Image (cartoon, grey):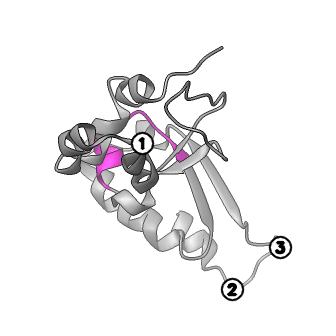
Amino acid sequence: LLKHWLELDIKSYRDPSIMIFDELDSTIHPSLVWKFTDLLKIISKKVQIFIATHSTTFIDSFDRKDIYLLKDNWSFSEKVKVESNIMSYEKIMNYLNKDEQEVFKDTSPSELYINWYIDNFFPIIK
């Protein structure tokens, strides 16, 4: 539906430039996640897509280069000085020490984002 909606010839609206989805994967049957993410990749060529998720399957269906971390309250203690609260997977990996990089370089992308690993590396100070 999303793909065909964006390809309609006759429109009474403007195409969106951004689409934001929260827990989009919660409405998709697990067996369809990989096909659905392929569709989202096609759509993302026309529209910038933001997806919030806790699904390891959903995260792992995207390339590392397409995964970003967005935090509301951003403070990395003494570990990192940041300019933005949006960080790419590669940038996060670059902030880690060699031992930490070794742990995550060959694991699935979701391993860095689940089980609070990311918060252990970059604690939020309130």
Q: In the image as oriented, which residue stretches furthest toward the front?
A: 78
Counting other residues with Cα less than 10 Å from the Cα at mark 3, is it few (<14), some (14-19), or many (20 or more)? few
Q: CA distance from mark 1 to mark 3?
A: 29 Å
Per the image, the residue denoted by label 1 is 25
Residue 19 lies in the magenta-colored region: no
Q: How many marks?
A: 3
Q: In the image as oriented, which residue stretches furthest toward the bottom?
A: 9
Q: Position of residue 80 (x, y in %)?
A: 53, 37
Q: Position of residue 15 (x, y in %)?
A: 74, 72
The numbered mark, 1 or 3, whose residue comes first in the sequence reads 3
Q: Is residue 73 left or right of residue 124?
A: right
Q: CA distance from mark 2 to mark 3?
A: 10 Å
The numbered mark, 2 or 1, whose residue comes first in the sequence reads 2
Per the image, the residue denoted by label 3 is 12
- What's the magenta region? 51-61
Per the image, the residue denoted by label 2 is 9
The residue positioned 16% from the left and 50% from the top of the image is 106
Quarter-of-image position of residue 120: top left
Quarter-of-image position of residue 85: top right
